[in-house]
Amino acid sequence: MNGRVRVLLVSGSTRSGSTNTAALATAAELAPDQVTAVRYGGLAALPVGYVGAVIVESACRHVPVDRAAIGPRGTVTDPGFTAGLTQVWDALLLHISKEA
């Protein structure tokens, strides 16, 4: 894969202290060097409905987040979670490299 990849991270929750938002904050911090992860914070202002997002099934993982594992910076501190997130990034980059 050549060049950088931009990934838009959109949390499905607008609640303060959301585990979904904490997971995406952690994903942004753990993004590989070739990825620019952009967190979108305007969900509450969007109209409800399908927006045509691309779902990469091979990168989908169920990585539970314990609310107690959300640190003061709003990121997840659990090593098991961060390991699972690294697998997600690897699968996503593999998928992108096959399409290039």
Image (cartoon, rainbow, N blue to C red):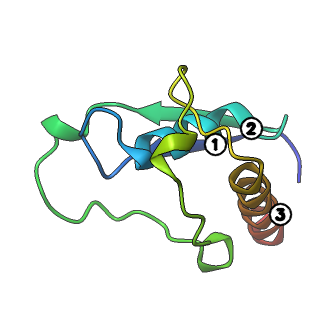
Dot 2: element: helix
Of callouts 3 and 1, the N-terminal one? 1
Residue lying at the far right of the rendered structure: 1
State if disc 2 and disc 1 touch (CB < 8 Å): yes
Taking 70 as reference, is 47 left or right?
A: left
Dot 1: element: helix
Residue at the disc numbered 1: 27
Dot 3: element: helix
Q: In this view, does 95 lie above or below 6?
A: below
Task: Please name the amino acid that badge 1 sits on.
Answer: Ala
Q: Which residue is drawn at 53% across and 20% down?
A: 72
Q: Position of residue 31 (x, y in %)?
A: 74, 39
Q: Residue at x 82, y 38 (%)?
A: 34
Badge 1: residue crowd in 10 Å (few <14, some 14–19, many ≥20): many
- Front residue of 26/99: it is 26
Residue lying at the far top of the rendered structure: 73
Task: Please name the amino acid that badge 2 sits on.
Answer: Leu
Q: Marks 3 and 1, how far apart in space?
A: 19 Å
- Front residue of 76/55: it is 76
Q: Residue at x 88, y 54 (%)?
A: 1
Q: Marks 1 and 2, how far apart in space?
A: 5 Å
Q: Position of residue 80 (x, y in %)?
A: 75, 56
Q: In this view, does 99 lie above or below 93?
A: below
Q: Which numbered mark, 3 or 1, is in the foreground of this view?
A: 1
Residue at the disc numbered 3: 97
Residue at the disc numbered 2: 30
